[in-house]
Amino acid sequence: MLFQKRAKPSRLGPVHSFSIYYGISTAEMKRMLVATDLAIIEPRQWQAEDIRALREAGTAVYGYLAVMETPSWNKTRWTAITDEMRLIAHGQRIRFEQWDAELMDLRSAAYRELLLAEIGELAARVPLDGMMLDTVGDIEEYVPEAQRAAMGEAYKTWLEEAARRYPALRWLQNRGFAQLEACAPLLSGMLWEGWNGHEARGDWVRQRVELLRRLRQDGLGLLASSADPSPIHGKTARKHGFVHGVMSDMYGV
């Protein structure tokens, strides 16, 4: 007789709702976020006492961290970046003009240390449950193919050190599907930002959903967000085991 393996509890904890908000702390937003189980915020925009109040009300708070990109608004990191930390492809820096950011080279030990120090500074200033690791998907989307394997290894090395150095924090990765299998044991959850229910039956999505189904069995929590409030997105996401949220105007930036 075959027995189906029982899924382990989500390492994110009991999360049934979540919000993403990168704007400043306001009374209205505090009321909204306190009604969710998990909130992803830009911690530089908040005071420690406001985050503490969210957590005391039962909301897990994750701070935003761009891993593969450095945006110009992050003044502290931007001014510390050196040429060796930037990824150069075909003799040129890789820029994202729409959000004024540059692609970084995670193979640089100095850059990895800069990110680790940034986490430490944030965690010392405000009380966080974890970090949401954004732009990891740049490794498979923008890094030249010849450099992707080494960049993926560098990301795993960095994440291992982050988990060792900050054991009280949990790690939530946004997309970055190519890195998930190797890094899942270090992660508490995965966010599929930009979930599109209209594409749920396509081969590309189905392959990644199958990977996530297996990782969910081992305790990886799954979140999905869509900008479009159409019911098909939430329906298909929940069918595949995601906690779904509509984030059409919540980012606050």
Image (cartoon, helix red, strand yellow):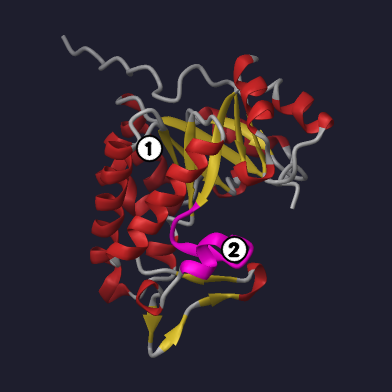
Report if residue 126 is visible in the image: yes
Confirm whether the magenta stretch covers residue 67: yes
Q: Tell me the quarter of the image containing the N terminus.
A: top left
Q: Residue drawn at (31%, 55%), measured in percent from left and top?
A: 155
Confirm whether the magenta stretch covers residue 127: no
Span highlighted in magenta in the image: 66-80
Q: Residue furthest top?
A: 1
- The alpha-carbon separation of the residues under discs 2 and 1 comes to 35 Å
Residue 123, image x, y percentages: 48, 37
Q: Secondary structure at mark 1?
A: helix
Report if residue 203 is visible in the image: no
Q: Amino acid at mark 2?
A: Lys
Classify 10 Å Cα crowding around label 1: few (below 14), some (14-19), many (20 and above). Answer: many
Q: Which mark is on residue 212?
A: 1
Q: Residue drawn at (38%, 63%), measured in percent from left and top?
A: 139
- The residue at which mark 2 appears reads as 75
Which quadrant of the figure has residue 165? top left
Q: Residue drawn at (35%, 76%), measured in percent from left and top?
A: 84
